Each structure stands twice: as C-alpha cells, then as structure tokens.
Image (cartoon, helix red, strand yellow):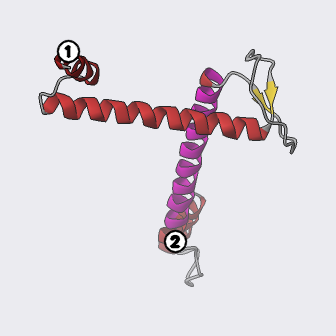
C-alpha cells in the first residue's frame, strides 16, 4: 500500500508540474509479489498450526496421560491411566506402536471380511463348524 501511495503521489507531482525529473520509484509489481509471497507463507504457517492443534486435541482425547521429556529407559506396562499419569518416552512409543498394530489388524480383518462377502464364502467360524459336523 505504501509503494502504491508513493507511486500515485509521484505521478501526481509530475502531472501538476511540481517535479520535472523522473526519480526512481519502487516498483509496484515487485512489492505486490513480495506481499503475495508473505501471504502464502502465512497461509502455510496457519495450516501447520491448525494441524498441530488438531493433533494435540486428538492426543489429549485418545491418549489421556502426559509423556515425560526426560530420557529414561523405564519400560513396563501402564497401570494407572488417569490424566495425571506421566509415562516415559519409550513407553509412549511402545503404546503408539501397539495402537498402530491394532489398527492394522482391524483393517486386515475388515479387508478379509469384505473379500469373503464378495466371494459369498461363509464366515470363518461357520466354515470350521461345518467341517466339524461332517467329521
């Protein structure tokens, strides 16, 4: 905005005859390009902040205990899962790995079930029952 105002002021002074020489004035297109680059950076930062806030909210919702920032090799099970529970980072990583493994196993079961439905195969427990009845 400042560059535009300076350009308008400079042009009006030339038109009115106050200035007769062409002074070097800042280019509007360069200033506009820098402005848009700054806007793009701000947009990316806001998106990142939003993603971090969503991740933090989900973390507080689904993993309701704090993770210690101290390096420690304390491993073991988490017995008390209250909001005041503090676990080590290695326990946190182990918990996350278990959650990922569980999610993958659920996905595999769903995929296998979908395949069986499309192939019109009986469910696994009925197949084993019919084999047991024929024996």
Other-residue count near label 1 (Cα within 10 Å), few / some / many at <14 / 14–19 / ≥20: few
The answer to which of 18 and 114 lies nearer the viewer is 114
Mark 2 or mark 1, earlier in chain: 2
Kindly indicate the quadrant of the structure image that contains residue 106.
top left
Of 87 and 117, nearer the camera is 117
State the image quarter where residue 97 is shown: top right
Residue at numbered disc 2: 30
Instruction: Answer whether residue 11 is visible to the viewer in this image.
Output: no
In the rendered structure, the answer to whether residue 131 lies left or right of residue 65 reads left
Is disc 2 placed on a helix, strand or loop?
helix
List the single residue furthest toward the left: 120
Q: Would you say 128 lies left or right of 134 here?
A: right
Apparent side of residue 71 relative to residue 103 in the rendered image (left or right): right
* Magenta part, dominant SS: helix
Q: Is residue 60 above or below residue 18?
A: above
Asked whether 29 falls inside the magenta stretch, the response is: no
Residue 8, given in percent of the width and then of the height, sits at: 51, 64
In the image, is residue 103 above or below residue 2? above
- As rendered, which of 8 and 133 lies closer to the eye? 133
| Residue 110, x across and y down, in percent | 32, 30
* Image coords of residue 2 (percent x, y): 60, 59
Q: Which residues are magenta?
A: 32-61
Give yes or no for residue 43 being in the magenta stretch: yes
Where is residue 46 drawn, in percent x and y?
57, 44
Q: Residue at x 67, y 38 (%)?
A: 94
Q: Residue at x 53, y 44 (%)?
A: 47
Q: Is residue 15 visible?
A: yes
Q: Which mark is residue 133?
A: 1
């Amino acid at each position: 905005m400042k560059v535009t105002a300076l350009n308008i002021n400079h042009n009006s002074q030339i038109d009115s005859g106050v200035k007769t020489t062409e002074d070097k004035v800042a280019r509007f297109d360069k200033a506009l390009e820098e402005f848009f680059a700054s806007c793009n950076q701000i947009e990316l930062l806001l998106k990142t902040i939003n993603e971090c806030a969503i991740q933090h909210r989900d973390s507080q919702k689904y993993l309701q205990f704090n993770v210690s920032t101290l390096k420690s090799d304390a491993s073991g099970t988490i017995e008390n899962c209250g909001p005041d529970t503090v676990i080590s980072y290695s326990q946190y990583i182990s918990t996350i790995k278990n959650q990922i493994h569980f999610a993958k196993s659920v996905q595999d079961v769903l995929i296998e079930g979908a395949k069986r439905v499309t192939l019109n195969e009986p469910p696994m427990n009925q197949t084993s029952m019919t084999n047991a009845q024929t024996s």
